[in-house]
């Protein structure tokens, strides 16, 4: 029952059938059967979303990225579109995952008139259900109905699939578009190229997988027209996307670069712990198995080779990142239930189904079918036990969610007072997008009032530049920033020494009006005198030149070189005037 035997058997079928499709008539993708299958796939996901989980809590602390994606889409709608076609975020990661998901979500916001997180979760489960339909059609095309039924049943009812599809994450969109391209390719090569191109805009992994699928499609005989149309579709989407990314970020492959070249290099990763180190060998073994399957598929190239390449390639990428790069520091004991392994699980079951309903009957005859069905049923029933740890993990998010909801309502109640609501709400470094959601959804605030502390004056200064060493320059920069942004409420984190020192030096400018003990935030009302535009412009130049005319370093008064030159020139001019 080796992979080589599976691929060899498929080649034999191709030869017997002249490389044509299986004997049974394929079902059209858009048919009553497909609609019924789609409704069956939607049912458990909708039941979980509205009947089991809290629709507003996608998994606070477990699936925080869902709120990050929502934040990007929401702020794009409220702010980004008014600055031309551009994405917007408080954390600076608006282009990190790609452009398609926030654009689709913005469209949903406009169409429905709502900005509820439930829209993101419905979008996710809709694409996840589409993947279920595509798995059925692809398995029936390449193998047989029993394989399609088993693979589809797992993708429909497996707890990991239901949980992740209903989460609101990006992966279901990227996977479904990739599978759609594979389904379209035999006769609709233009659509296949477009689908694969859109997949790259949905998930950074698809930059690799879609490019691989395009190249692999040339390994089978096809007309020049089909290849031209596929390349036209894929190339057009990629060209438009890369031009947009280059215009907005200066890097045409921005998502690919930061997700893989930076993540794999460990630029943002935490130190490795013992449990991660012990898990690494297992991921290396899984990576080797997936890579072997990938190479074997490329060698044999059965009729199903594009689907197998996508499956093995996706697994090799995930296991390779975890086993061979610094990305292993993102592995935690509960990661097995998360998005990163959702499709590898579906693909693994597809391989099991091939073994049970394609390979096993060839060795044991048709009488083995009842054993295969029984085995498949037991495996599917056994997977339902994983609901226990999944629900345990999800239930644990209720407490942080309640904290974030209360925090958002509390801050909104302060900012909503007449003295402050005409200004801006200056928020801490945005590691809490759930609070942003709470401010909007429960606090009723408008995102156009939000200012991110990520882009404070220190963001544009050299590393190590602090208020304590440069109180005049940094203080004036902070005054310019707070006054220019019209900050009326300043949410000040306890760990921002620059802010604390600045406020301590100017107590008349700040008034404590609240406190969020859970996160160590002090809420300050701002009454700061605005410097002149000329002062702000000059101090910015001074900061870039190395400081201000009167800064302190290690307790000593210092002058930057530019200031020394200006004072020297002024002194020389004064001496000449006196001498004259």
Image (tube, rainbow, N blue to C red):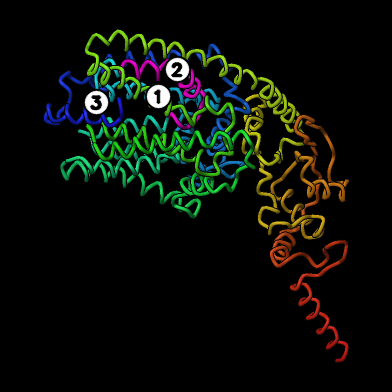
- Residue 489 visible within the image: no
Q: Earlier in the sequence, mark 3 or mark 1?
A: 3
The residue that label 3 is drawn on is: 142
Q: Report the front residue among 369 and 404.
A: 369
Q: Main secondary structure of the magenta part?
A: helix
The residue that label 1 is drawn on is: 346
Which class describes the residues within 10 Å of circle 2: few (<14), some (14-19), or many (20+)? many
Q: Position of residue 77 (x, y in %)?
A: 53, 37
Q: Quadrant of residue 460?
A: bottom right
In the image, the segment drawn in magenta is 148-172
Element assignment for label 3: helix
Q: Report the front residue among 85 and 271.
A: 271
Residue 525: assigned label: none
The residue that label 2 is drawn on is: 158
Could you tell me how many numbered marks the image carries?
3
Q: Is 310 inside the magenta-drawn segment?
A: no
Give the distance between the C-alpha atoms of the residues marked 3 and 1, in whole angstroms.
16 Å
Give the distance between the C-alpha atoms of the residues marked 1 and 2, in whole angstroms.
9 Å
Q: Position of residue 225 (x, y in %)?
A: 17, 43
**Image quadrant for the N terminus?**
top left
Left or right, residue 140 beside residue 47: left
Q: Residue at x 67, y 53 (%)?
A: 459
């Amino acid at each position: 029952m080796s992979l080589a035997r599976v691929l060899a058997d498929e080649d034999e079928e191709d030869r017997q059938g002249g490389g044509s499709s299986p004997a049974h008539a394929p079902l059209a993708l858009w048919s009553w059967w497909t609609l019924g299958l789609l409704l069956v796939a939607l049912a458990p996901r909708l039941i979980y979303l509205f009947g089991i989980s809290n629709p507003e809590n996608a998994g606070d602390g477990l699936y925080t990225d869902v709120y990050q994606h929502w934040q990007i889409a929401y702020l794009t709608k409220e702010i980004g579109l008014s600055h031309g076609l551009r994405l917007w975020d408080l954390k600076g990661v608006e282009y990190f995952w790609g452009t398609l998901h926030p654009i689709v979500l913005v469209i949903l916001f406009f169409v429905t008139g709502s900005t509820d997180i439930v829209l993101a979760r419905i979008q996710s489960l809709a694409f996840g259900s589409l993947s279920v339909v595509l798995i059925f059609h692809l398995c029936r095309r390449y193998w047989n109905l029993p394989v399609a039924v088993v693979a589809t049943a797992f993708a429909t009812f497996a707890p990991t699939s239901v949980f992740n599809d209903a989460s609101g994450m990006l992966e279901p969109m990227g996977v479904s578009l990739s599978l759609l391209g594979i389904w379209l390719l035999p006769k609709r090569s233009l659509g296949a190229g477009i689908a694969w191109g859109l997949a790259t805009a949905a998930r950074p992994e698809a930059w690799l997988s879609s490019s691989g699928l395009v190249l692999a499609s040339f390994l089978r005989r096809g007309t020049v027209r089909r290849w031209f149309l596929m390349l036209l579709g894929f190339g057009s989407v990629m060209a438009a996307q890369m031009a947009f990314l280059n215009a907005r970020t200066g890097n045409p492959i921005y998502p690919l670069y930061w997700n893989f070249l930076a993540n794999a290099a460990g630029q943002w990763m935490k130190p490795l712990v013992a449990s991660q180190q012990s898990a690494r060998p297992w991921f290396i073994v899984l990576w080797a198995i997936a890579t072997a399957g990938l190479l074997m598929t490329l060698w044999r190239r059965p009729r199903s080779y594009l689907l197998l390449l996508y499956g093995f390639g996706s697994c090799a990428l995930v296991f390779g990142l975890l086993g061979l790069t610094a990305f292993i520091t993102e592995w935690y004991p509960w990661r097995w239930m998360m998005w990163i392994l959702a499709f590898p699980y579906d693909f693994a079951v597809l391989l099991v189904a091939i073994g049970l309903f394609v390979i096993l009957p060839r060795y044991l005859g048709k009488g083995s079918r009842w054993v295969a069905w029984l085995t498949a049923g037991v495996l599917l029933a056994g997977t339902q036990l994983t609901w226990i740890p999944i629900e345990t993990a999800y239930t644990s998010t209720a407490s942080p969610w309640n904290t974030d909801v209360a925090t958002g309502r509390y801050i909104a109640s302060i900012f909503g007072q007449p003295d402050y609501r005409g200004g801006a709400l200056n928020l801490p470094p945005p590691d809490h997008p759930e609070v942003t959601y709470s401010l909007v959804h429960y606090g009723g605030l408008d995102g156009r009032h939000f200012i991110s502390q990520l882009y404070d004056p220190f963001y544009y200064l050299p590393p190590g530049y602090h208020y304590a060493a440069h109180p005049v320059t940094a203080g004036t920069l902070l005054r310019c920033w707070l006054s220019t942004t019209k900050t009326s409420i300043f949410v000040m984190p306890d760990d921002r020494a620059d802010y604390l020192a600045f406020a301590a030096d100017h107590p008349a400018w700040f008034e404590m009006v609240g406190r969020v003990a859970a996160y160590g935030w002090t809420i300050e009302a701002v009454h700061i005198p605005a410097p002149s535009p000329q002062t702000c412009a000059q101090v910015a130049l001074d900061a870039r030149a190395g400081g201000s005319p009167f800064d302190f370093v290690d307790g000593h008064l210092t002058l930057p070189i530019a200031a020394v030159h200006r004072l020297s020139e002024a002194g020389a001019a004064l001496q000449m005037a006196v001498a004259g």
